[in-house]
Amino acid sequence: HKHSPSAIRFGLTGKGNFTGVEGEDVVFGPGDMVLTPNDAWHNHGTVGGEQAVNLSVLDLPLVETLHAVHFDHKYTEMVDGKEVEKKVQTARYPGDYSQRIYGEGGLMPRFVDHKRGGGLSSPMYVYRWEKMEAVLDAHKDWDGDPHEGIVIDYVDPTTGGPVFHTINFYVQMLRPGERTLPQRETASLLLAPFRGNGHSIIDGKRYDWNQFDTIAIPGGSWVEHVNGSSSEPVIFFGATDAPTQKALLLYKRWGRNQAGDLLRLV
């Protein structure tokens, strides 16, 4: 099937997650993020007989509000010159295509078509956890941002921008004992604790969370995050609709310093 809302799947448990997207068969596990972009044919399942759990995030509320939702379930391929309806896509790319072509930052092959799936999103359809984890580990001793800790964005390797035009994704790390300073922004956020536990203070109210919970932070809300562990980091998987707001010149972000003074951050 395919649809106009853009979506991702973020692996939580199980190593046999499967998503076939535009002819690339992706098997993925915990921490891997797989794109199913606007108007890209895809199908889901598992391989190997092991149960798997994913977090799926879509820009469906925005697309629905704009009355631009469409779904298509009739997938066809040309076979011997005839259009034939199929339930499973024929693989057209090797299973490691995304990592082989786009997996080295700053280096991009010229000899492939970078407009897969109509060119409506990042052509890198799977972002592997080991790559993200290596970047987090390399920066665990940096000062980071006092309002966010260490944040690494997922980007479209061909533009350096967000993976979708409407919504973007990131990983946020709080070091042991770290507490962020208060901030608020116009964008709405979704955070999923991938590792660790702690609490957040949203508009003055405390919310405790554990691994695989989901935290919704409405646009305009003041928020602080606290890692209560003295030995283990907290790692969030996050989603934001900031790209849409930035395109419409509506995005703003504020914070407070240690003295409580209001700061205009963006």
Image: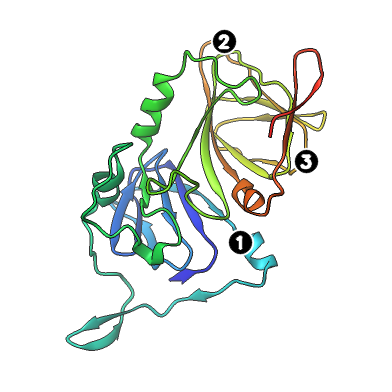
Q: Quadrant of the N terminus?
A: bottom left
Examine the rendering and report whether any part of residue 62 can be seen: yes
* Residue at the spot 39% in from the left edge and 28% down from the top edge: 133
Residue 42 visible in the current orientation: no
In front of the other: label 1 or label 2?
A: 1
In the image, taking residue 200 as reference, residue 50 lies left or right, namely left
First along the sequence among labels 1 and 2:
1
In which quarter of the view is residue 179 placed? top right
Q: Is residue 134 above or below residue 230?
A: below
Q: Which residue is mark 1?
A: 60
Is 266 on the left-hand or right-hand side of 142? right
Q: Are marks 3 and 1 in contact (CB under 8 Å)?
A: no
Q: Mark number for residue 230? A: 2
Q: CA distance from mark 3 to mark 1?
A: 21 Å
Query: Pointers 2 and 3 in contact (CB under 8 A)?
Result: no
Q: Residue at x 32, y 37 (%)?
A: 106
Q: Is residue 132 above or below residue 54?
A: above
Q: Compute the Cα span from label 2 to label 3.
A: 30 Å
The CA distance from mark 1 to mark 2 is: 39 Å
Residue pictured at 29% horizontal, 69% vertical: 89
